Image: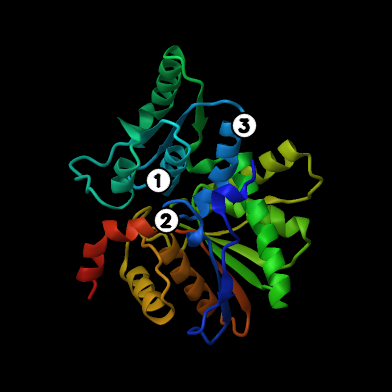
Amino acid sequence: MNRKEFIFRNTPLYKLDSFKTNNIYIKRDDMTDPVCGGNKARKLQYFIEEILNNGHNYIVTYGSKESNHCRITAAFASKYNIPCTLILAKPERNMEISYNGNYFLYDLLDADIIWSEVDNVSSIIDETMEKLGLEGYNPYFIPGGGHGPIGTHGYVKAYEEIENQRKDLNIDFDYIFLASGTGTTQAGLVIGNKLYENKEKIIGISVARKEERGKKVIYDSVCEYIKAKNIPLDISEDDIIFLDSYIGEGYGDIYGNVLDTIKNVAKTEGVLLDPIYTGKAFYGMLSYLENKNLKGKNVLFIHSGGLPLVFNYTYKFKDNK
């Protein structure tokens, strides 16, 4: 199956006009398909290819009530008429589930939902897969966030796309910044960087994990991919740059600097970031460049999507005025 059936096109890469201290470029992976796109689409296209080519007829995956991964999984499943179950982590006690953002899209796309306590997720997955098998399905489980070598491969290939666009623009990047969560996006970019023997620093802005844990998860993903593909690359954990200075109070903490950054980028560039991932990462990038007194550098920001999340937190923007 032709992978272009999934993403349909290369995503744009261009220079932003309103940031003068450094030359900041953006890679618009929010413009992948389907259904509001994002970095998860690059990973899931390879999972879907495997599902279709191997006769699987039911998809199960795991995520949060606001998971971009679950949204795009449900969208691909709907597009190819494959039933889909999302196993979602129960929200915190007494937290109301708002019918908007990604949660609205789960429903729009007819995904079945099973709520689970975080500690019970593994057993719920096993029970669901066994039940579907007994019902005559050939189910396929996609790890949360598209984790694993298949997901990592999506961003090894994305780096190849970036390399071609970089050559067309006749520039070399000094830095590539991204929001770093489950780690496979950054792992794929690190591998791509080594394969092309480029020198830019790839800097992940953590949205949840502390540095020690985050670096290890990314490095493990790198090693798993290299082993699976039998690629002779020498990459150490020291090659992973993962900054936990911009998490705030933890995953999902939306603070004023992030909201101000989102508003500024929307007003000056017409680009919408989200408050959980890309807004935090863009703020972290600008802060890092300023704190390091870096000027005149060629910087690439990976816009990894997450648009529906904006609409879960409109009240935050109102309160931040």
The kind of residue on which mark 2 rests is: Cys
Residue ID at (62%, 52%): 155
Residue 240 position in % (x across, y down): 63, 56
**Front residue of this view, candidates 122 and 165:** 165
Residue at image mark 3: 53
Q: Nearer the viewer, mark 3 or mark 2?
A: 3
Residue sitting at x 41%, y 19%: 127
Measured Cα–Cα span from mark 3 to mark 2: 25 Å
Residue 208 numbered tag = none
Inspect the image, locate mark 1, and give the three-letter code of the amino acid beneath it: Arg
Query: Could you say whether the residue bearing mark 3 is in a helix, strand or loop?
Result: helix
Mark nearest the camera among 1 and 3 is 3
Q: Amino acid at mark 3?
A: Asn
**Which residue is under mark 1?**
71
Q: Residue furthest right?
A: 232
Q: Residues within 10 Å of mark 3 (few under 14, many from 20)?
A: few
Q: CA distance from mark 1 to mark 2?
A: 9 Å
Q: Are marks 1 and 2 in contact (CB under 8 Å)?
A: yes
Is residue 198 in view from this perspective? yes
> Which is nearer the N-term, disc 3 or disc 2?
2
Q: Is residue 13 above or below residue 40?
A: below
Residue positioned 45% across, 21% down in the render:
129
Residue occupying the far top of the picture: 134
Q: Quadrant of residue 186?
A: bottom right
Q: On the rendered image, what quadrant is the C terminus found in?
A: bottom left
Residue 29 percent across, percent down from the top left: 52, 60
Q: Residue 36 bears which disc, if any?
A: 2
Residue 49, given in percent of the width and then of the height, sits at: 60, 38
Cβ atoms under marks 3 and 2 closer than 8 Å: no
Tell whether 155 sits left or right of 81.
Answer: right
